[in-house]
Image (cartoon, rainbow, N blue to C red):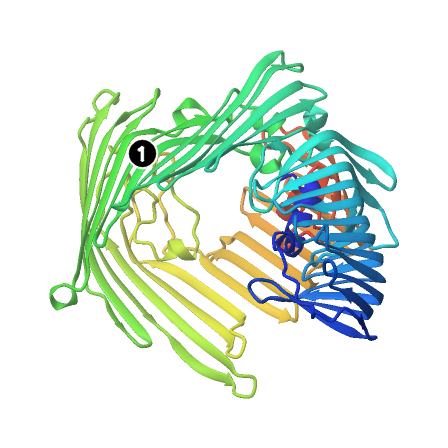
Amino acid sequence: MPKNLAIGAALALTLLPLLTAAQEKFVCAISDDASLVPDAALVSIGNENDEIVRFEAGAIDARMSPRMSASMTGGVTVRRGNNLAGADSAVYDPNGQSLKLDGNVRYQGPSAEITSSSAEFAYDTGQIRFDGAEFLLGNNRSRGAAKQLHISQSGTLTLDDVSYTTCPPESNDWLLEASDINIDTNKGVGTAKNVKLRFQGIPILYAPYLSFPVGNARKSGILTPIVGSAGRSGTEVSVPYYWNIRENIDATVTPRWLSDRGVQLGGEMRYLSQRNSGELSFEVLENDSLLDTSRHLISLDHSTHYENGLRNIIEFREVSDSQYFEDLGGTLSLSSITHLDRKVQVDYFGENWTFFGLIQDFQTLDETIAPIDEPYQRVPQFRASVRYPKQWLGLSLGVDSELVNFDRDTGVTGWRLDLAPTIELPIERAGWFIKPAAVLEHTRYDLSNTQAGDADDPTRTLPIASFDAGLFLERTLNSERHLVQTIEPRVLYVHVPFREQNDLPVFDTIMPDLNLVQLYRKNRFLGVDRVGDTDQLSVGITSRILDIDTGEELVSATIGQSRYLSDQRVVLPGQLAETNNSSDYIAEVSFLLYDHLNFDVGHQWGDSGRGTTQSEARLQYRPQNNKILNLAYRFRSDSLEQGDVSVSWPLAKNWNFVGRYNYSFRDESSLEQFFGLEYESCCWGLRLVSRRYLSTRDGTRDSSFALQLVLKGMTSLGTAADKLLERGILGYSPNIN
């Protein structure tokens, strides 16, 4: 539903008690005595369900001849359940079966308040009308006025000459106006004519006719336009149109005008059924004025869940050129994409076994990647795993298997079969565990396009033995503060004998960075084209300090290292064998230094003069939700060294400063910077952000300007600057909603 028509839905929902009252016909229960009822008189009228309507007035003149009528003066109050109405005077009309209120009319219900000059409750026809009405709606105290507010027994709400705002009574900073609003609660549809949105008295939006859904119903219509800067493409104006096709299918069509490139058409369709769900989207720029060519994007995400547990996933991405996201994507994260993944996947998860099937290829966007370095297609890939825990003598038995065909236009291609039967004896007790295991890994290839003299069916069989053990120790550190310290040592021994593997291709195997997860893996490579020979002992210890009362982790520290008891000879092509007798030390520490002040650091360094390999540190100070200061540093030997400062901080009562500065010490240049201001009043807010960043593709600099106007309880206009701030400032959450 377009947010700038929230008035219609709000009125329909909050005035439902009146709608209900209009649909009931009351039965008179005043006594037969046709006399003047004394001051402060009380008269009750009950409906057929014995729900009581009570009239209180200074004086009631009730007459039964020829038909019952009543005139109430001296201040009138009408109560029915949680609903209250009042006026200076009231007249019950027996001919029209109506109650007419006059002078200082007021109505108060659980979620709505209405004041007017006069009103009429027609119980015979179920009509309710307020003249010169002013209303307050819901918990957000949104308010408005209408020349006439009319409710019919059929559930139709009509308002003439309407105005609406969430600003306080003394302010009309923004105001929504309409000559006529009609809401049909039965059909769940509302319409509005001659709609104007004024900000500081200036019209900023106009629509001659709009329709919108009521409540949770969906309705086709124009959504809030987007106006702002699109970086390399100039000024952007987008006008989304929402199309409610069916109950489980909808679409959004978005014409987008880019001042420097032309008109782009985008679309998105979503669907949902008992088994299927997905989203299909496209973007087409028929003629890019800067490049004089057509550009497009196509995307599909689909999943099917079958009753037997089988699942099917389809993902497809394609763009017309490698610069598409850089020019038209709009965010730094999109512009840094190097490959687009396209796949069809089938998987199944059973009690003891799992199955995975895949067909996958990629569109490479980074033109600096050579064809020989592009990823392989998997056409197809099958994986199956079987696990039978707690067998004879407590043994756990299993088999991991994979069959995949790697294809590419350049280099060696072919099939790879990998089988890895496993036997383990896990023993777990309170405070400790041990898990000895043995794996026999067999890999076989059937290759094409090999070099002369190379085998086209190489194989490799390797036994892998391991012993994993750990302790969990705990002690009371401070009984008064209920602090507990844990000490959690862990040791993993792995033995893998050497097998010559230089004749095996490398389809999908890499050497990952060392981290605490990698420290306890049995193969130092990711992928099965290489299994690293080793005779190593990995040792680590973690200690935590916990507050038992709150469950908060005050301190967490981990350090670990692997010791190599023999030389390692297996390498990837172009790499050198490890000659050190140990890995780098890895340490991670997290502190709650003080209330709202957190410090996290990760450090990796080697002995024998190797120095620091990589390091990361982050300090966050957050005394309040709207006060955030982040300082961060990242270092990787021979690769990068960066500093990052981000902040969101109030400058004055209504002003907030936001900013981020990301700097590369290695390149002596900023990577991204944005600075802006947020202003928040009682009923509206404004974000103004200027951004400049370095292109990850061609090294050029780009800049953009975002202006976002937020009308509280209504909508936001302009570029969605809050998304940029959420991505760039850790912990940031929009204060203006």
In this view, which residue lies farthest toward the left?
392
Frontmost residue, 24 versus 604? 24
Name the spot of residue 239 as percent of width and height, x first.
67, 29
In this view, which residue lies farthest toward the top?
292
In this view, which residue lies farthest toward the bottom?
480
Q: Residue at x 80, y 54 (%)?
A: 682
Left or right side of 43 for 319: left
Does residue 251 appear anywhere in the picture? yes
Count of labels shown?
1
Identify whether 212 is placed above or below 92. Answer: above
The residue singled out by tag 1 in the image is: 506
In this view, which residue lies farthest toward the front?
66
Label 1 is placed on what type of residue? Val
Residue count near mark 1 (Cα–Cα under 10 Å), binned few <14, some 14–19, many ≥20: some
Name the spot of residue 690 as percent of width and height, x first.
75, 39
Name the spot of residue 479 as percent of width and height, x first.
52, 87
Frontmost residue, 235 versus 437? 235
Left or right side of 127 for 477: left
Residue 391: name its quadrant.
bottom left
